Image (cartoon, coloured by chain):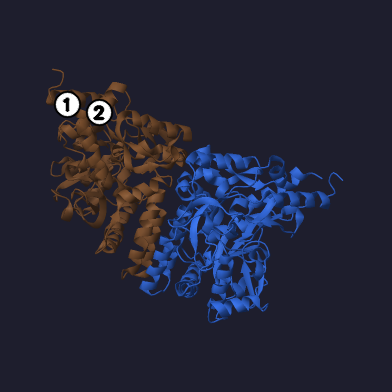
Chain colours: A blue, B brown
Amino acid sequence: MDIDQANATAVEHMMESRPILRGVAAAREVIPGMQEDLLLHAGPPIEWERMSGPLRGAVIGALLFEGRARDEQAAAALAQSGRIRFEPCHHHDAVGPMAGVISPSMAVYVLEDSTHGRKTFSNLNEGYGKVLRYGAFSAEVLQRLRWMNETLGPAIGRALEGDEGLDLRATMAEALHMGDEGHNRNKAGSLLFLRFLAPRLARLNLPEAERAEVLRFLGDNALSILNPVMAACKAMTLAGHGIAGSTVVTVMARNGTDFGIRVSGLGDAWFTAPADVPVGLYFPGFSEADANPDIGDSAITETAGIGGFAMATAPAIVTFVGGTPRDAMNATLEMYEITVAEHKIFTMPSLDFRGTPTGIDLRKVVELGITPRINTGIAHRQAGVGQVGAGLVRPPMAMFEEALVAFAEKYELGN
Amino acid sequence: MDIDQANATAVEHMMESRPILRGVAAAREVIPGMQEDLLLHAGPPIEWERMSGPLRGAVIGALLFEGRARDEQAAAALAQSGRIRFEPCHHHDAVGPMAGVISPSMAVYVLEDSTHGRKTFSNLNEGYGKVLRYGAFSAEVLQRLRWMNETLGPAIGRALEGDEGLDLRATMAEALHMGDEGHNRNKAGSLLFLRFLAPRLARLNLPEAERAEVLRFLGDNALSILNPVMAACKAMTLAGHGIAGSTVVTVMARNGTDFGIRVSGLGDAWFTAPADVPVGLYFPGFSEADANPDIGDSAITETAGIGGFAMATAPAIVTFVGGTPRDAMNATLEMYEITVAEHKIFTMPSLDFRGTPTGIDLRKVVELGITPRINTGIAHRQAGVGQVGAGLVRPPMAMFEEALVAFAEKYELGN
């Protein structure tokens, strides 16, 4: 068996994937397998009992949002009653940042991979401050979610109707030339998203105050494109998944308790280990003692070759995640050690337009002892608080080792 | 006399200048000294007889636009009749890219320096292709100018009414962290401009098609903020002008025939020399043989410490002006040799957030034999054609030598 050839195929499929943002719809209408008693969440599978504070907070918020409970206590009781099922977003070709909770009536982005035809999904970004994805569920949080469902989502959805849609791969490539790494820094990409939407929103018959509100919300949120970018990265890695004999990692995701990965040649199996607390910069008044272990599906960006892997093109990000511009350059250079290819589309001017390190090779991670570099936000460990910082995390090596053993067993290598 | 102290003062004034975009109005209503028989142009003073093709083309276009002539021949005859006066934009605290022609009825941006109180002006950017600033004057060019005067300008003007305005210095600083150098590359800045305008335009009572058209025009034009940026740079350099004993260069400008500079401690005197042809990349079908000598007021960006001086933060620009990212880094490093200060507000992540080289010191230019580096567009040498490329130009050393002699005479140095 030629593992290198299988990996080359997997990465080629990833790079050929061309996800287009097509629309916005309620999760129940578009996400395969979505059901009324189901909540999707970030990371590998987990039950209520083992959920961390921010994921519990987001579950509570989602149940309040859905009108399934009247208050926090009732929502928590319902969540642990067994009458609500929990499944990873990744089991439904969806992704969500941080807690990543998607409930049936939530508006989600619909992307279609124009090369491979598959659809992927993500929720809409809420902006900063107290937000569901960081486990906050106050009245303000729920009110914003309702506004997103009733105003923002439908407006974007209508703007996309009958349109060619937004080419996420091209937009991400452009943003990488404008100082974004596409995970923690999405300033340029979000402005490109705004540029795409503004004239299309202008054509809609919308109340002026509502249109101004939508444009201001999108403009003020330098993460507005993060969720479509994540869904695009999901499409890309999905395209590289399922190649027999490939050791390319196609999912890295965290639920706040466990870190989990999936591997192209290993089907639907999750390999998990306890998630670590990120190292980074904390907002005033917070420290590592407040931090929840690593959480979110957003590591799909690094899995697709951007985010922490593209730090060299985003030196300004160090003011947010810590370190120096030299560290940022070195982060990218290190990731070439554990990847299969240099991206054909995602290039970095500061490295003479070299492609980003793409396609994490399980074998290299274990052989070299270098784990992938992941940029991330940091959530407070208690439900209801929110973001306390941002920084860097490395996934636990144990998962990769376990996956490599499973790979050797499945393909009967060295036995 | 302490020249170093005078230069420190001049540069301090430049960096403290905080220009705010306040509005849009007809040139005749707001530009001091604007008159019905007057056309403003880029660069130092020049008469019709010595004007190059693109400047003549823009003059012809402006006279057609103003309804002062019915066709090209009549416009050229009027221009050389002596009944039209020509004065530099710089004599009126205004600036314009390339030909830089501003006629009485043209919509212009009005900026106010909130630190020093002075107003500066620029015309509106026309986008790409056949445009007046490159000397084109076809029906299509004039139609676009009319649309800009009747639709775009008034819409932006109304959006700014009763508003706090756009802080150009802050916006430029942000754009420098997003891969712009602020002269040839203004992609990020133009998106930040769109982000500022979009919700404000949404509030206006405008026909939907018109609003969509304005948003699309602004979004499609990655130079839309260039002209406000130039007017901001004019405000900054104006703030540093007129400091007794200062050798800081406060104007660099080209009219397509002559390059001219002004110096802080030397009042209104121009020092000029023949303009050179830029070195750069040409559009398909064109070569250096088609190129006009250097033209435009846009070198005000380098004079204020951005543009070619900030190349290190904009490695992607080399695909447009030529060279490698390493050359771009070296360009900035070289400019530190001839400047007085590192900018307090304009910083470059890739150089560990070092400030851009700011305040060209006449003495250093002459002593070290290093002329300022200027990024620029390249116009066809014939009227009516347009842009043929983009690249790099160095101003003639002779002007700096002449200015240094004048400085020595005025301040009785070494005599």
Res A275 seen here: yes
Tally the numbered discs: 2
For label 2, count other residues whose C-alpha is less than 10 Å away and answer few (under 14), some (14-19) or many (20+): many
- Judge left or right: residue A344 versus residue B13: right
Residue B362's label in the rendered image is: 2
Residue B49 spot, x, y in % from top left: 20, 35
Callout 2 touching callout 1 (CB < 8 Å): yes
Query: Which one is in front, A121 or A255?
Result: A255
Query: Which one is in front, B307 or A323?
Result: A323
Is the C terminus of chain B in the top left, top right, bottom left or bottom right quadrant?
top left
Q: Chain of mark 2?
A: B
Q: Chain of mark 1?
A: B
Q: Amino acid at mark 1?
A: Phe
Q: Is residue A164 above or below residue A353?
A: below
Residue A45's label in the rendered image is: none
Query: If you read the primary sequence from the N terminus, does the residue marked by circle 2 or circle 1 appear first?
Result: 2
| Label 2, label 1: how far apart the Cα atoms are | 9 Å
Is the N terminus of chain B in the top left, top right, bottom left or bottom right quadrant?
top left
Residue A340 spot, x, y in % from top left: 67, 43
Tell which residue pokes out farthest to the right in this image.
A415
- Judge left or right: residue A321 versus residue B190: right
Residue denoted by label 1: B407
For label 1, count other residues whose C-alpha is less than 10 Å away and answer few (under 14), some (14-19) or many (20+): many
Which residue is painted at 54% across and 65% down in the image? Answer: A382
Q: Amino acid at mark 2?
A: Leu
- Judge left or right: residue A243 versus residue B31: right
